Image (spheres, grey):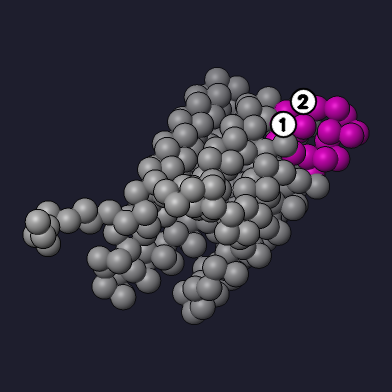
């Protein structure tokens, strides 16, 4: 019997939507935990990593909306949703930079670096609003994560900080997740490369969260 159009399932890629929503919920949970850590110890590194996780959660939620309802949106609405997703990725990178700066440098130095980070974020936003190719988001976020990775590797090998080692693990797992996503690896017709990317990214977020919980502001770190 033919299904009436109003009875058809509206959500496309349901597994991708589901894994995106789980990733979003996990990021929000980590954000809340780090926020409470900040209230307890008043460390800026916890506060800004918390902001980063909040924005990551928003990005994953926007991704779920895009995968689930994107085909039902107008071209203008779909493009707006896509740009919002890319901008959230840039904002997450911005907060990751600031969090790392508070861990690695004095407050006075960070205040100067903040302006540089703001300028970079503004430049990224202008580029995305003019050319919303995913390439720009990949370049901006990858460059940011490489900066964070460099700082944490220095901490790990110079001071042996456990938190830094966990953050390094989280970043490397996130890179692995990105490689999987770009490779198009599909394990099942109902579990594609995006779904696998989200699952691996959850592991990366967990290590990143566990590591940042152990970090402290400079020079206490």
Q: Is residue 217 left or right of residue 14?
A: right
Taking the view exactly as shown, the residue that stands out farthest to the top is 40
Q: Nearer the viewer, residue 14 or 28?
A: 14
Q: Tell me the SS state at disc 1.
A: helix
**Mark 1 surroundings: few (<14), some (14-19) or many (≥20) residues within 10 A:** many
Q: Is residue 54 left or right of residue 150?
A: left
Element carrying mark 2: helix
To which quarter of the image does residue 219 belong? top right
Q: CA distance from mark 2 to mark 1?
A: 6 Å
Q: Is residue 50 above or below residue 182?
A: above
Q: Residue at x 49, y 48 (%)?
A: 188
> Can residue 46 be seen in this snapshot?
no
Residue 160 position in % (x across, y down): 85, 27
Q: Position of residue 144 (x, y in %)?
A: 68, 55
Where does label 1 land, which residue?
166
Span shown in magenta: 151-168
Q: Are marks 2 and 1 in contact (CB under 8 Å)?
A: yes
Residue at x-position 79% and y-position 44%: 151
Q: Is residue 93 left or right of residue 33?
A: right
* Magenta-colored stretch includes residue 25: no
Q: Quadrant of residue 212?
A: top right
The residue wearing badge 2 is 162
**Which quarter shows the N terminus?**
bottom left
- Residue, x 62% and y 52% (percent of image)? 180
- Between 1 and 199, the one nearer to me in the picture: 1
In front: 9, or 220? 9
């Amino acid at each position: 019997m033919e299904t009436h159009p109003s009875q058809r399932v509206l959500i496309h890629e349901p597994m991708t939507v589901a894994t995106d929503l789980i990733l979003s919920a996990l990021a929000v949970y980590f954000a809340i935990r780090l926020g409470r850590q900040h209230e307890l110890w008043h460390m800026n590194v916890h506060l800004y990593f918390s902001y980063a996780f909040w924005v990551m959660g928003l990005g994953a939620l926007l991704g779920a909306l895009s995968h689930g309802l994107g085909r039902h949106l107008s071209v203008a609405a779909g493009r707006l949703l896509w740009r919002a997703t890319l901008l959230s990725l840039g904002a997450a990178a911005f907060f990751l930079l600031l969090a790392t700066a508070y861990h690695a440098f004095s407050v006075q130095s960070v205040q100067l670096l903040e302006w540089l980070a703001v300028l970079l974020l503004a430049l990224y936003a202008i580029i995305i609003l003019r050319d919303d190719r995913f390439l720009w988001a990949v370049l901006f976020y990858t460059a940011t994560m490489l900066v964070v990775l460099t700082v944490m590797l220095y901490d790990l090998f110079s001071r042996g900080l456990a938190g830094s080692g966990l953050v390094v693990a989280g970043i490397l797992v996130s890179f692995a997740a990105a490689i999987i996503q770009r490779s198009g690896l599909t394990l099942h017709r109902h579990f594609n490369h995006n779904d696998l990317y989200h699952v691996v990214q959850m592991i990366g977020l967990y290590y990143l969260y566990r590591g940042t919980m152990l970090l402290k502001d400079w020079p206490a770190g």
